[in-house]
Image: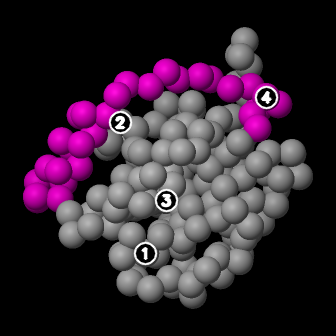
């Protein structure tokens, strides 16, 4: 385990436990989508997914990550693409990013990233969401895990997540 991983593990152990709420899809109001941005930052698949959630009257925030220093402004309303300059040398989000993330509360976090990118793992860890969904079990960050086939698209992962999310019936 390298130094960045050790720091991540140390920080994760110091996060306050959160109360998990299993949501009924109809009662979800706010969703944050985490995704790996394309190098050109156009992300047409993410646009489609955001639109689908908005059609169901969900307020959607999309946070992407692109492993380059300077990122452009995203073309989606209420979205942001983080780049290398938003994280410190140890891979953790800078204070300004943390403050922006932690002042918002979401009903559901949907992490569409497929690779264990340290920046994405930090975003998933620090995002304030009552219910977190992802496909990587190694960090124990998610309330619901879905196994998706290697090489599957974000849209495929999203469709699987939505299928199971709509099956949840709770007394929320």
Whole-percent x and y of residue 14?
25, 34
Mark 2 or 4, which is nearer the eye? Answer: 4
Q: Residues within 10 Å of mark 4 (few under 14, many from 20)?
A: few
Please state, as top left, top right, bottom left or bottom right, where the C terminus lies in the image. Answer: top right
Q: CA distance from mark 3 to mark 2?
A: 15 Å
Question: Are the residues flagged by discs 1 and 3 in contact, CB closer than 8 Å?
Answer: no
Viewer-side residue, 91 vs 114:
91
Residue drawn at point x = 29 percent, y = 59 percent = 92
Residue drawn at point x = 83 percent, y = 53 percent = 54
Residue drawn at point x = 67 percent, y = 45 percent = 31
**Reading the chain from its start, which is encountered first: label 3 or label 4?**
4
Q: Residues within 10 Å of mark 3 (few under 14, many from 20)?
A: many
Does the magenta-highlighted stretch encompass residue 7?
yes
In this orientation, does residue 25 appear? yes
Q: Residues within 10 Å of mark 2 (few under 14, many from 20)?
A: few
Whole-percent x and y of residue 20?
52, 23
- Check disc 3 and report its element: helix, strand or loop: loop
Viewer-side residue, 74 vs 150:
74
The mark found on residue 140 in the picture is 2
**Reading the chain from its start, which is encountered first: label 1 or label 4?**
4
The stretch in magenta equals 1-29
Whole-percent x and y of residue 102?
49, 45
The mark found on residue 83 in the picture is 1
Does the magenta-highlighted stretch encompass residue 69?
no
- Check disc 2 and report its element: helix, strand or loop: loop
The mark found on residue 113 in the picture is 3
Left or right: 44, with 70 as reference point: right
Question: Are the residues flagged by discs 1 and 4 in contact, CB closer than 8 Å?
Answer: no
**Reading the chain from its start, which is encountered first: label 1 or label 3?**
1
Residue beneath disc 4? 27
Mark 3 or 4, which is nearer the eye? Answer: 4
Mark 1 or 3, which is nearer the eye? Answer: 1
């Amino acid at each position: 385990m390298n130094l960045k991983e050790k720091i991540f593990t140390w920080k994760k152990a110091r996060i306050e436990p959160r109360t998990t709420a299993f949501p009924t899809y109809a009662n979800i109001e706010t969703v944050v989508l985490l995704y790996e941005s394309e190098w050109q930052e156009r992300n047409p698949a993410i646009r489609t997914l955001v639109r689908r959630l908005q059609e169901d009257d969900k307020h959607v925030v999309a946070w992407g990550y692109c492993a380059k220093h300077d990122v452009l402004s995203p073309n989606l309303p209420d979205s942001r693409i983080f780049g290398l300059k938003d994280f410190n040398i140890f891979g953790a989000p800078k204070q300004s990013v943390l403050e922006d993330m932690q002042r918002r509360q979401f009903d559901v976090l949907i992490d569409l990233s497929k690779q264990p990118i340290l920046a994405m793992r930090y975003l998933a860890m620090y995002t304030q969401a009552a219910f977190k969904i992802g496909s990587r079990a190694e960090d124990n960050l998610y309330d619901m895990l879905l196994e998706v086939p290697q090489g599957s698209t974000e849209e495929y992962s999203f469709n699987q997540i939505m299928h199971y999310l709509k099956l949840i019936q709770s007394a929320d």
